[in-house]
């Protein structure tokens, strides 16, 4: 397949379809029980950053799905058959009986295995991208079923709006919280990857109660991430990230996202967000830092 940007004469080919795989953040994550099927029963408030990985797609007539990966974290990913982008593309293609293929480019801006749903968001963005690229209609229920087969976080990432998520990720409800939409947010990763399976295996199986998502104050004072303790046991540097974020001016909330190791801070203003980003970068130039906002629905 020719390079998707230019033809042999250097002229641009068709404009690609583009989707952003928005970074997912768990404002709170309560683990309530281990289910009989091996999954965990969760309650979590998902929000999404305005930024994330970037996908571009070009349609082809040969039925092939080709993937190239670039970007700051592109070298950490394999473009083989197990890649979630390819799995999502082939699942949708098979479900639809689609004869066309696609060339997909993933620009990996988010660190891998970092608790902000990078792979899940990539898979969800692939489903959105190919539905547009192939101009097909698929209802929300069908898309949710395909998404859940790809991973527990993928259904929530399809819409990428603020949601209460329960079960293993199949029970979703849009959920507005005053003060969250558009809130300045800093994401910080100390450069360590942690295994989601290992972190969940380290959960102490204590149900510490349900999640109250009625207000930002309730999320701050009564919310928690039940995976923080096992993550800290494996990667103590997460504690350094949390302490650094908590020490910044006008931070509303500092907590780990998902199974780590990325942590987030919510701030009162763009000014204090910018100051915090600068302070963290100066203090720890080896850490990954992304200045963003919570995406509005």
Image (tube, helix red, strand yellow):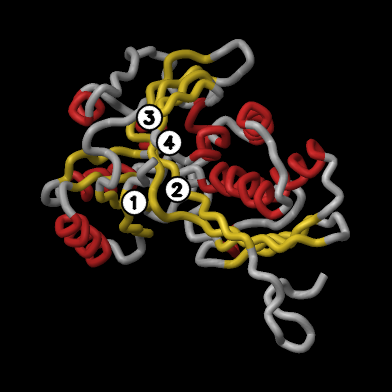
Q: Residue furthest bottom?
A: 9
Query: Distance between the Cα atoms at labels 4 and 2?
Result: 11 Å
For marks 4 and 3, the one nearer the N-term is 3
For marks 1 and 4, the one nearer the N-term is 1
Residue located at (16% from left, 47% from top):
268
Residue located at (23% from left, 33% from top):
178
Q: Judging from the image, what secondary structure is the residue with disc 4 in?
A: loop
Viewer-closest of 249 and 199: 249
* Contact flag, marks 1 and 2 (Cβ < 8 Å): yes
Which residue was labeled with disc 2? 23
Q: Which mark is residue 173?
A: none
For marks 1 and 3, give the one nearer the viewer.
3
Q: Judging from the image, what secondary structure is the residue with disc 3 in?
A: strand
Q: Label 1: few (<14), some or many (≥20) within 10 Å? A: many
Q: Which mark is residue 187?
A: 1
For marks 1 and 2, the one nearer the N-term is 2
Q: Position of residue 23 (x, y in %)?
A: 45, 48
Query: Distance between the Cα atoms at labels 1 and 4?
Result: 12 Å
Q: Which mark is residue 258?
A: 4
Which residue was labeled with disc 3? 45
Q: Position of residue 261 (x, y in %)?
A: 41, 44
Q: Label 3: few (<14), some or many (≥20) within 10 Å? A: many
Q: Label 2: few (<14), some or many (≥20) within 10 Å? A: many
For marks 3 and 2, the one nearer the N-term is 2
For marks 1 and 3, the one nearer the N-term is 3
Q: Judging from the image, what secondary structure is the residue with disc 2 in?
A: strand
Residue located at (56% from left, 13% from top):
35
If the image is split into quadrants, where does the C terminus sit? top left
Query: Distance between the Cα atoms at labels 4 and 3?
Result: 11 Å
**Is residue 233 in view from this perspective?**
no
Viewer-closest of 136 and 171: 136
């Amino acid at each position: 397949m020719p390079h998707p940007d230019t033809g042999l004469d250097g002229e641009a080919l068709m404009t690609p379809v583009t989707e952003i795989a928005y970074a997912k953040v768990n404002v709170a994550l309560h683990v309530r029980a281990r289910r009989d099927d091996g999954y965990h029963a969760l309650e979590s408030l998902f929000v999404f950053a305005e930024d994330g990985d970037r996908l571009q797609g070009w349609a082809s007539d040969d039925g092939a799905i080709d993937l190239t990966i670039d970007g700051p974290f592109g070298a950490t990913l394999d473009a083989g058959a197990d890649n979630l982008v390819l799995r999502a593309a082939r699942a949708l293609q098979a479900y639809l009986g689609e004869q066309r293929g696609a060339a997909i480019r993933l620009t990996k801006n988010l660190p891998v295995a970092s608790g902000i749903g990078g792979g899940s968001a990539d898979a969800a963005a692939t489903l959105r991208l190919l539905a547009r690229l192939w101009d097909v209609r698929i209802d929300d229920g069908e898309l949710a079923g395909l998404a859940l087969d790809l991973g527990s976080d993928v259904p929530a990432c399809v819409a990428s709006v603020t949601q209460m998520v329960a079960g293993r990720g199949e029970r979703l409800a849009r959920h507005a919280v005053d003060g969250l939409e558009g809130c300045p947010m800093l994401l910080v990763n100390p450069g360590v990857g942690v295994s989601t399976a290992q972190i969940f295996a380290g959960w102490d199986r204590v149900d510490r109660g349900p999640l109250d998502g009625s207000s930002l104050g309730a999320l701050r004072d009564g919310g928690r991430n039940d995976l923080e303790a096992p993550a800290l046991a494996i990667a103590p540097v997460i504690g350094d990230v949390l302490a650094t974020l908590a020490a910044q001016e006008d931070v509303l909330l500092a907590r780990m996202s998902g199974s780590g190791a990325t942590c987030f801070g919510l701030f009162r203003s763009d000014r204090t967000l910018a100051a915090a980003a600068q302070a963290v970068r100066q203090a720890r130039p080896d850490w990954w830092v992304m200045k963003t906002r919570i995406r509005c629905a």
